[in-house]
Amino acid sequence: MQSFYITTPIYYVNARPHLGHAYTTFVADTLKRFHRMCGEDARMLTGTDEHGDKIVKAAAKAGKTPQEFVDGISAEYQALWPKLGIEHDQFIRTTDPAHKAAVQAFLQRIYDKGDIYFGEYGGHYCTGCERFYTEKELENGLCPQHLTRPEYISEKNYFFRMSKYQGWLKQYILDNPDFIRPERYRNEVLAMLENGVLEDLCISRPKTRLEWGIELPFDRNYVCYVWFDALTNYISALGWPDNEQDEKGNYRRYWPGEHLVAKDILKPHGIFWPTMLKAADLPIYRHLNVHGYWLVKDTKMSKSLGNVVDPQVAANVFGLDAFRYFLMREMNFGSDASFSEEAIITRVNADLANDLGNLFSRVLSMNAKYFGGKVPAHGVPDEADEELNRLTDNACANYVQLFRQMRCSQALDCLWEPVRAMNKYVDVQAPWTLAKEGKTERLGAVLRTLLEAMYRVAALLWPVMPSSSAAMQEQLGHPLDEKRFSAAKLDDLLVSRTHLRTGEPIAAKSALFPRLEMPTKEEKTGKTEKGENKKATPAQQPQPGAKAFIEFADFEKLDLRVGIILAAEQHPNADKLLRFDVDLGEDRPRQICSGIAAHFKPEDLIGKKVVVVANLPPRKLRGLESQGMILTAEWDGGLSLLSAEAPAGSSIR
Ligand code: ME8
């Protein structure tokens, strides 16, 4: 069985987990699930990076010993991931004894090969980055990351002969075009290798300056530089070096793996790590997958700006699967993306509530109404059915291919083509008309075509939205069984148009993706403010440009009802108006005139369910009495009819 090993960076424990950490970890979880779904032996690693200057300083500030401090924050990370539905197989800490022993073995191996030497070094040291900068790398004498003035330090240290591997690494990247992806980051690393000489890497810190680290096995007066320590986690977690020769051990089973990082740590992963592996005669990782930054309203997240997004709060407010979907869909892997409440609400309402949720809700309720909730038989497919099937086949195949290339956002975009096409197909095929005309066989064929395509989309969405995908599969009478994932099953999803069983009962309704509203302050903080003012607070004022608030009692005066259009024709005296007979569940249909002639052909609207304001006083429009108003949604040049899947006369609240 093919194996797949995905890692996240191990996060520093000097700060609490935020949206950025959650994103990388969600992507890793999604990829692990995707490869499991492909029938592979997939494993995911995450963890915490706990040594170094930064941690010592943060611990001192918190009035704790480094060990107490790292235990506390590492525990927060460990507790968070399961709450976010992350299913990692292992959580590594760089303070684990097995990791420390692995780092020492790694150092010793390179030392014995002659690629670690002792020398004098003077350089500009930035504590924020935990690294030395050369004069050339500074910007106006300041660290380019932290914009602080580094300290000039001169001391004797151990060095890794990284320069020796410059030519090898450059050639390796040229020979393996997708080793670092997307391409822009490959080019960045190539530029670092092509512009000048790669310097040797200082890999020690004298204990006189820093004690909180792993001792060098060949000199007890020094501890290991954090990056050398941290990068080794990717193999120490697999049990290296003890199981290096063991065919059945995790190291031989999973290495080389796939790494996932943001652009901030491109250099250590793109340059230090492959040269370290090469020097230790170990296989090089498969790919370095580099993503951009999440910005908050176009600014970097920072504690001082107070704009750090807490992933747990976001998952609680918006729903875990909706949050995951948004992150995967909104960030084009490799580029930066912006997080805002407006962005998530817009995306979730459009893609999940309107497109996918609405599709499930209308198709399942029609199936309940027309076939008692049982899967109807396949009919003889007509051209429209074939077209939808072909579109679904292509979209499913492209989705899988794009996922393999880490292009999750494009993959999801692709899968939404059949979702949107299915909604259109429902409108065009108009099952309600087929039902009225007694065309039961054709009605069954239409619903079966839809149900099969819906199942394929729902199943493929599992890596991104595990619970919703499982719920949709269950609604379609096919509960998810993770034990049955296999390459053959995935192939079947991609090509077969028969997954459901004729006559089997399925759900009569579905309400998986509620529309999101802007969260209140209380929902965001989870607290009520003391002495809260019962009147509208500024956060509750209407948005600029919106209408003034009304009392609830005013809203209750409206009689909104579901109506079915029984007849529709052009108004005899007005080009802009259509005349309808609408069944509102009363003794006889009402005549309603509506100014929507520019947008619809009257014959297309027969059988449609609409929402009607039923208690407006009758009014004459160009000679014909109108006994109600049909509600529409309008946007730039576009117009659609509001609809609700409920019997005629149902009241709307
Ligand atoms: O660098 N947008 O740890 P770290 C997207 N310990 N991702 C973000 C982000 C943002 N705004 N902010 C952080 C370290 N991340 C080292 C790693 S690995 C051997 C050692 C994510 O806590 C992203 O994955 O600073 C980034 O690479 C990582 O957190 C940095 O985490």
Image: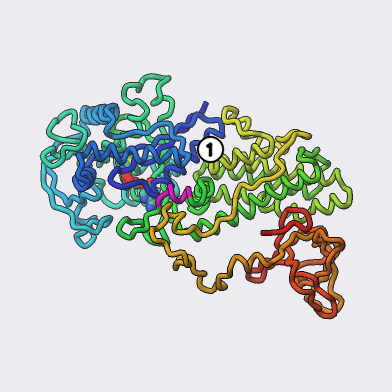
Does residue 394 appear in this view? Answer: yes
Q: Which residues are magenta?
A: 310-316
Name which residue type carries label 1. Phe
Horizontal placement of 324 versus 587: left or right? Answer: left
x, y percentage for residue 362? 71, 50
User: Looking at this view, is 516 or 293 the one in front?
Assistant: 516
- Residue at image coords 32%, 21%: 242
Q: Which residue is mark 1?
A: 34
As drawn, 274 above or below 339: above
Q: How many marks?
A: 1
Confirm whether the magenta stretch covers residue 315.
Answer: yes
Local secondary structure at mark 1: helix
Confirm whether the magenta stretch covers residue 254.
Answer: no
Does residue 598 appear in this view? Answer: no
x, y percentage for residue 454? 68, 44
Mark 1 crowdedness (10 Å alpha carbons): few <14, some 14-19, many ≥20: many
